[in-house]
Each structure stands twice: as structure tokens, then as C-alpha cells.
Image: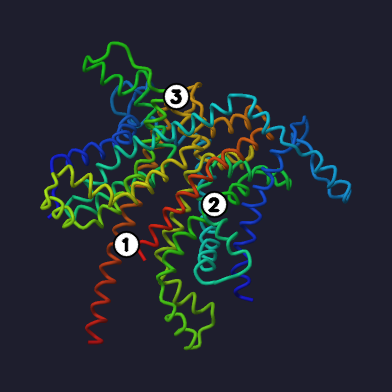
Amino acid sequence: MRRLFLIAVPYIWLLALFLVPFAIVLKIALSDIALAIPPYTPTLDLSEGWAGIRAFLSGLDFENFVFLTTDDLYWRAYLSSLKIAAVATVITLLIGYPIAYAMARAAPEWRPTLLMLVILPFWTSFLIRVYSWMGILSSEGVLNQFLMALGLIDTPLQILSTNTAVYIGIVYTYLPFMILPIYATLEKMDDSLLEAAEDLGCSRLEAFWLVTIPLSKGGIIAGCFLVFIPTIGEFVIPSLLGGSDTLMIGKVLWEEFFSNRDWPVASAVAIILLMILIVPIVLFQRNEQKAREAEG
Amino acid sequence: MRRFSWFNATSLTLGFTFLYLPMILLVIYSFNASKLVTVWAGFSTRWYGELFADQEFLDAAWVTIRVAVFSSTIATVLGTMAATVMVRAGRFAGRTLFSGMIYAPLVMPEVITGLSLLLLFIGIGLDRGIFTIVLAHTTFSMCYVSVVVSSRLATFDRALEEAALDLGCSHFQAFRLVTLPIIAPAVISGWLLAFTLSLDDLVIASFTTGPSATTLPIKIFSAVRLGVSPQINALSTLMIAIVTVGVITASLISKRAAVAQARDEQAAARATA
């Protein structure tokens, strides 16, 4: 009885507020847009019994998905989201690895402080961290003023409202997610392995490449997934820092829903976004499981 | 011996400058007298005054705090229950689905969570407002809570609970008197995490709210959409200050607790020796 209650309460909550809504999205993705409230058809009318259910099912089709393949806006948005996420992940790795490495090499008494300094931005509002770049990157912003004072440029650079600003925003906000897992693997590393490699004739750089990098592979992979997966569906960064030509699927979905009021197409966009995400998510889970098995 | 070279020092300096400079600039410019947010015209607290005089911001802050308190509290209860199920309940029908539903919201893009919940609320004819945002926030943050709590529960020694049961505790008493105090740090960090996630959320709240309830992130987003605003700089500075003080206090408290625990354990070890 007690056990049943313990299982049932969170189970029912998640069924009602996670799984059912998701089924509704799938259903609306298969419906047609209509000038009605709610703005789609068919709606399920259970009062008519079987006839109602049959009429409902016959109204469903894959039209919206076909529509997504004919309008190349969606293709380009998916591809461009994947590209932006992939490039941003690589840049975040290149910036995050040296920081994680230096943290792991710092004196032990310094490490908790450094770790807290990496975690602190994570507790600060995501929206504010993205917003803080608007004042820096705008044409009369801090960065342009600085570069012009140095005499490096004569006219302000247009950075805000371009993809460059989107990359900066992603790298900035997701950097802690890259640093933490890499730091966790590097911190556990046994230094005598490096000494052994050097005794056996490796140069420092070779030892780093042949010993440190392979040993931190788990952290690198975890960090890359933690940046890549959420970036694909990102909305806040492209809408605040990107321009009208910045195509990201989260932004397209938002606009399809709030500006075009086309719920069926917005739902179809959501379903495909999720199908794209399933591959990296499954790979990530497998990587985590492998790491757990290796540990215990 | 670990080597700490100039290269490491440079990467740390550059890295932390990159992480902190934007926020430091935001704080500095919030005290700028000029309305042109990028031209420095002397020190002023004018924008803070305007911020506190703006009823819309105060209303939005109050809505946000209420949503965060309610959703994180319910999420902590549900998340702790879910964690107990995940770690303790063993096999039951639908367990795979259950753990799937716990982990999926963690990686689900916010636009999809928001869209799906909005379609549900419209489907069942629920009036959108504070209540629906609380439902939405509870649903995704309970998953975070359950991940945090279950990692603590997994290392928990069940013998302690069995001892309490042997000594005459009811199941609920054993949980309240033995289990809960031991997993309390994880439950508290789960609550804090849920609270922060709720305070921070723009996308899901935008989808699930109605005209009656505007949260602070929604208000900030609509204010900065068209460019930098000095009032938002002031608001951001206040939020950064609150978070910084909160995190530093929490880490000092947990450090002191760790020291106290170590001392108690030493004393116990001496007493039994």
C-alpha cells in the first residue's frame, strides 16, 4: 500500500504532465490548421462514441511533415542548428580544455575556489548572462569602443545580430558544462603516468597528446554532449544575439507558434527536432553507462 | 609533483576574465548616469530608483518568487519520492517508462516542453496563469531533484533504517527521523536547484502563462529584445548580487558542516576505541 502510493504519485504526475502532453503534440502534428479555437482540426469528440473516434483518426495525416520537406526554410533551419551547435561545441572544447587542465594542475588548496568560480555563473540567470553580451557587442558597445580607442578599427564592427554573436553567446553560457566533466577526469589522473611517459622518451607535448588526452577522453565526450544537445534547440541566444538571418530551429518553432499561429506545423517541427536529438542523446547515455561500468 | 606553468596561469586568467568580465561590465554600467547605456556619464543610482518605482517589475518579481517557491517545494517532495522509487522500489511494471520519464525532461529542449504543456492546458481548458506555470516548472524540476537525491540515496546505508524499524519506528517515522536527516543536504540542494531553474526559466513560462501572470524573465526578455536597457542592467546587478551572496553563504555553511561532521566522527572513533 505504502509502496504503491510512493510509486503512483510521481508516476501519475509525469504521465499527466509529460507523456500525455507529448502525445498531444504528436496528434496535433498530424492535424490540419483551421480557423477555429483551438486552431486545428480534427478534435476528438468522445461523445459520439466509435463514430467520433473513427472520424478523428481519418482526419490525421502526415501533411505537415510533407510541408516541412517542401519549404526549404525548415531544412536550412535544422541544418544550420546542427552546424552552429557542432562548431560552437568545438570552440567551447578548445577554450574549456586549457581552463580545466590548468584547474587540475593548480595547488590543491586553490581547487575548491576555482571550482566554485566555474559553478557560480551557472547559478546566475541564463537570460542575464546572454543579455550581458548585448551591451558589449552592439555597434556602440564596449568592444567596439575599445577597439576604436586602440586605433585598430575606424568604423564599428557589426557583431551583434550576426552568427558570430550567437557563437560567442553559446560558448560563454555553456563553457562551465565543458569545463566541469573534463576537470573531473583530469583531477583523478595519476601524474606518475606522465613521468613514466617522459622517462620513456616522450617530450612533454607528446606525453600530453599520448597520455593526458586519451585519459580525459570520457570528460571530453561528456562535455561535448552537454554543450551540443541543449544548443540545438536553443531559443534565447539566437533571438537576443542573432540576426534575422540566424536560423535555429528553436527560434523557428517559437515564431511558427507565436507569430504565425500555425500550431500543427509548430508541433511537426517539434517532433522532428526531437527525432534529431534522439541520436546524440542515446550516444551520450551509452557513454555515461560505459564510464559508470569502468568505474565500478 | 604537478607542474603549474605560465601557460596554465594564462589560461586561468583569460578563462576567468572571459567568464566574469561581461557580468562585471553589466554591474558597472548599471550605475551609469547616462541613458545611453554605453557612454559613461558619471555615477548614479537613478536606474535603481526607477526600477523600484516601476510597479510592473515589482509585480513580475512577486509572481516569479511565488512560482519558484511553490514549484520548487512541490518538485522537492515529488522528486524525493521519485528518487526513492528509483533506488528502492526494485522491479515493478512500467519501471523503464518511469525512469525514461525522469531522465527525458533533463534533455528535452525547452521549446518542446513548453509547447506540449501549453497544448495540454488548452486541451483540458485550464485557465493559464500562475497555477499553470507552477505545474510546468514542477514537472521539469522534479526530475532534477530526483537525480540529485537518488545519487545520495544510492550510497545510503539501509541498515540504519532497518534498525529504526526494529526499535519500533513506523515506516514514516523511520523516514522522518533517520533517512531524511541523512539525505537532507541532497534534498536542500535539489530544492535550491529547482528554485533557481524556476527563477531563470523564460521559454516554458512564456508558453504556459496567460495574460494574468508575467514573470520576471518574460518581462526582462520583452524589455531587452530591442536593445540594452539601463533598468535591466540595474535589475541584473541585483540578481547577480543575490546569487553571489547566496552561493558563498551556502558554501561556507556546508564547509562548516563538513568540518563539524569530521570532528564528530573523530570523537566517535575515539569513544569506541
Q: Earlier in the sequence, mark 1 or mark 2?
A: 2
Q: Closer to us: mark 2 or mark 3? A: 2
The reply to whether dot 3 and dot 1 touch (C-beta < 8 Å) is: no
Q: Closer to us: mark 1 or mark 2? A: 2
Tell me which amino acid carries mark 1.
Ser
Tell me which amino acid carries mark 3.
Gly
Residue B268 at what x, y percent from top left?
Answer: 27, 81
Work out which residue is located at the far top of the displayed protein and give it.
Answer: A154
Mark 2 element type: helix
Judging by the rendered image, the residue that carries numbered circle 3 is: B227
Instruction: Please report, as a chain letter, where disc 2 is located.
Output: B
Q: CA distance from mark 1 to mark 2?
A: 31 Å
Q: CA distance from mark 3 to mark 1?
A: 40 Å
Same chain for the residues at labels 2 and 3, yes or no? yes
- Residue B59 visible here: no
Residue A165 at what x, y percent from top left?
Answer: 39, 27
The image's mark for residue B38 is none
Q: Nearer the viewer, residue A72 or B21?
A: A72
Describe residue B67's horizontal placement relative to residue B37 as left or right.
Answer: right
Q: Earlier in the sequence, mark 3 or mark 1?
A: 3
Q: Pointer 1: residues within 10 angstroms few (<14), some, or many (20+)? A: few
The image's mark for residue B104 is 2
Judging by the rendered image, the residue that carries numbered circle 1 is: B254
Mark 3 element type: loop
